[in-house]
Image: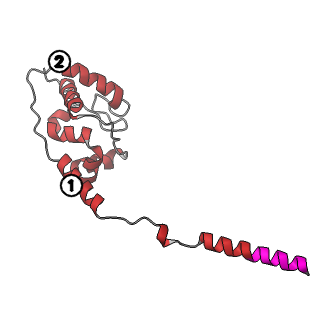
Amino acid sequence: MRKIKIVTTALLFAGSLSMFSCSENKAQEPETSQEPATKTAEAATAALSMPEVQLSTPLNQEWVTTGKGLYEMKCQSCHKLTDEKLVGPGWKGVTQRRQAGWILNMITHPDEMLNTDGEAQKLLEICLVRMPNQNVTQDEARHIIEFMRSNDGVK
């Protein structure tokens, strides 16, 4: 009889313990704040203001070379230099279809562009894959644009 009481007590204790450990504990849930969302929205708006990009004629060949190296390192796995789609759209003619500021934003802030820009969202519908953020600086993006212009036949 004593063994039955011990086993029953142990089972009740284990059952109670498991019930309390599986119950919701609202005190441990982190509180969310509206402030980070506001800051993120403000940052996205600031990032997406159309920057003025001064295009040089003739092309800056040093930038073209640097841009080609950046393309080979960060872009080539998804973008072809023709108009053919690979993972992302081909680059042929892109500098004639898009403003340099739009291209710069797409390179440096792809997440914000894909979330807010209608043209970027249309490209996402076609390509079905979000462009990853490659952490390209403004200067590096400017060199990539110079390489894109060279690819489009600008001298």
Instruction: Locate residue 140, reporting x and y percent.
Output: 24, 29
Query: For the residue marked with disc 2, what is the amino acid?
Result: Gln
Res. 42 mark = 1
Q: Is residue 99 visible?
A: no
Front residue of 113 and 124: 113
Res. 106 mark = none
Query: How much space separates mark 2 and mark 1, taking CA atoms?
Result: 36 Å
Which residue extends farthest bottom? 1
Q: Is residue 103 magenta?
A: no
Instruction: Locate residue 32, reporting x and y percent.
Output: 36, 65
Q: Quadrant of residue 145?
A: top left
Q: Quadrant of residue 40?
A: bottom left
Dominant SS type (magenta)? helix
Residue 61 in the image: above or below residue 3? above
The boundaries of the magenta stretch are: 2-12
- Tell me the quadrant of the picture where the C terminus can be found: top left
Res. 61 mark = 2
Query: For the residue marked with disc 1, what is the amino acid?
Result: Glu
Q: Is residue 77 visible?
A: yes
